[in-house]
Amino acid sequence: MKTPVIQKSSRSTLDYLKILDEAEKPISQRQKIIHTNRGTIRPPRKYHLDAQKLQKLKDEIAQGIIPNPFRKGGVYHAFTQALINLGANKQHSFLNVRKEMQAILLSFVTKDNVDGWTAFKNKSPRNSLCAKDVNGRIIQNAFVLQRLSGFDPYGEKLRQLGCCIDIFKGPQDTYVFQLRTGIFKYENVKPINEFRKATII
């Protein structure tokens, strides 16, 4: 039976769950089923942990360890690890998170033989009209990791572990970040963002 083409995402929290089976397949076998805002059709991306990996990380949580579900060497991993290193369930200033994130990325070397921090700082933007400096990119990544709805829920792995990224307003509207853990019900994972009018879902 042919997989139906799915229109561009609504804001339903169930969108990604509708295409979970397709996203589970190897990349080469995934069908193009999602209409994008650019007028193209693409296969779904995988944002969740499979059952085996999820259980392994949940076992670590049971042992008192806060696991990082993202790929080592990546920016999402570095941002999340910075919050773990600084202390989960505590609020941390932008400057402290940036400093810790920099230290983490400096320990990785990319395929171009440069450290991860340099690669992150010098990465070419997809859209030159809305290019951000390194500080803007860190903030943008925090916002992206709060996404739980639509076909691209970047924070899904955190949600599976009962975690999420919260963003608060600090003094003079500076950014303050927190990795919140211990949310026992999947549907109760709702990141806080004081720079938005509504809670992220």
Image (spheres, grey):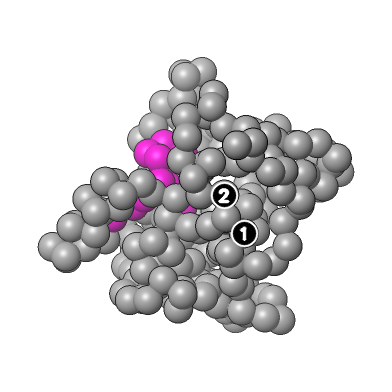
Point out residue 74 in the picture as x, y percentages from the top left corner.
Answer: 46, 39
Q: Quadrant of residue 167?
A: bottom right
Q: Amino acid at mark 1?
A: Asp
Question: Is 77 in the magenta?
Answer: yes
Q: Quadrant of residue 173?
A: bottom right
Point out residue 196 in the picture as x, y percentages from the top left corner.
Answer: 69, 76
Please name the residue shown 61% across and 73% down the image.
200
CB contact under 8 Å: marks 2 and 1: yes
Secondary structure beneath dot 2 equals loop
Secondary structure beneath dot 1 equals helix
Residue 23, can we see it? yes
Please name the residue shown 64% across and 36% down the image.
2
Residue extending furthest top?
112
Q: Amino acid at mark 2?
A: Ile
Left or right: 176 with respect to 52? Answer: right
Numbered range of the magenta stretch: 67-79
- Magenta segment's dominant SS is loop
Kindly identify which numbered label has been placed on residue 19: 2
Q: Give the residue pinned by disc 1.
A: 15
Please name the residue shown 65% across and 67% down the image.
12
Point out residue 194 in the picture as x, y percentages from the top left corner.
Answer: 62, 79
Quarter of the image where the C terminus is located: bottom right
Left or right: 122 with respect to 29? Answer: right
Circle 1 residues within 10 Å: few <14, some 14–19, many ≥20: some
Left or right: 71 with respect to 150? Answer: left
Kindly identify which numbered label has been placed on residue 60: none
